[in-house]
Amino acid sequence: MTSQHLIALDLDGTLLTDDKQINLETKKIISDAMDKGHIVCIATGRPHRASIDFYKELGLTTPMVNFNGALIHHPNDRNWDAIHSPLSIRTAHKIIHTCHELGVKNILAEVRDTVYLDQYDEEIMKIFHTNDENPITIGRLQSNLQDDPTSLLIHPEEEKIRALRDELDVHAELIEHRKWGAPWHVIEIVRAGMNKAVGLKKIAHYYHIPQDRIIAFGDEDNDYEMIEYAGVGVAMGNAIDELKNRSNFVTGTNEDNGIGEFLTEYLKLNRKAM
């Protein structure tokens, strides 16, 4: 058998097709890899509640990286040494103020799985999986947000993204800001020093997997550190060029079973991709 590997999967634009499903062939191949003893985990910018259904669909029993590393936890084991690294409330309020000055569509703050939304917006509520189990407070963030947030999500007009990111660079010592993949032009903000590689390193250490046996898949700028940290960094065919340039390999797209094709060949899984 091939030595045991840790396989880290980004969700949007990577594991998930454009209509937010897991390709059936990809799912079979991931299952096959787990049957052969490889370890699979999710590393995403999404919060826990918007990732857990995919975690269950793959039958995972591993820790998970959410909010681009600001929350590293184990969905099935409360005793696992979770790490939660929120932004300071002071910094968050400065950024919310900047956003209001620029005039963005909306701002959403999350404190783990509690959600605060600046203005009512059905589309955003659907995207961010708010439901009866996950309370949402709608209204002025400046007054409603009282705790250090795990992340801030800003929904700007597409033409304001560049200007917004330039403004956010003023806070560079305190925050990381990344753009989510299309079709959601969302800017996500977490505490400085937080990224998916931080989570991946902790999980690899937990399972005693050396760096050269970590395979990571991604497509966007929030995957840079993870792709560079992994011994085997794989950019999807639909990934941004900058990520492809930083990766060791480029595979097929999220629509064409790119993950499955790569794993079949690299781990010699004896399964023909359909």
Image: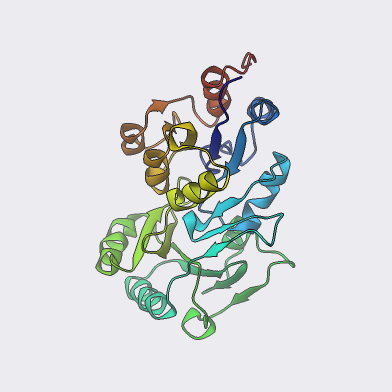
Quarter of the image where one finds residue 78: bottom right
Side (left or right) of 179 relative to 22? left
- Residue 73, x across and y down, in percent: 60, 57
* Image position of 149 with respect to 225: above or below: below
Residue situated in front as seen by the camera: 51 or 20: 51
- Residue 53, x across and y down, in percent: 70, 48
> How many numbered marks, from 0 up?
0
Residue situated in front as seen by the camera: 215 or 256: 215
Quarter of the image where one finds residue 79: bottom right
- Residue shown at the point (69%, 45%) measured from the top left: 61
* Image position of 39 with respect to 265: above or below: below
- Residue shown at the point (69%, 38%) measured from the top left: 58
- Residue shown at the point (49%, 33%) measured from the top left: 215
Question: Which quarter of the rendering shows the N terminus?
Answer: top right
- Residue 189, x across and y down, in percent: 41, 63
Residue situated in front as seen by the camera: 200 or 219: 200
Quarter of the image where one finds residue 138: bottom right
Side (left or right) of 154 relative to 166? right
- Residue 87, x across and y down, in percent: 43, 71
Side (left or right) of 138 relative to 192? right
Q: Residue furthest front?
A: 208
* Image position of 231 with respect to 178: above or below: above
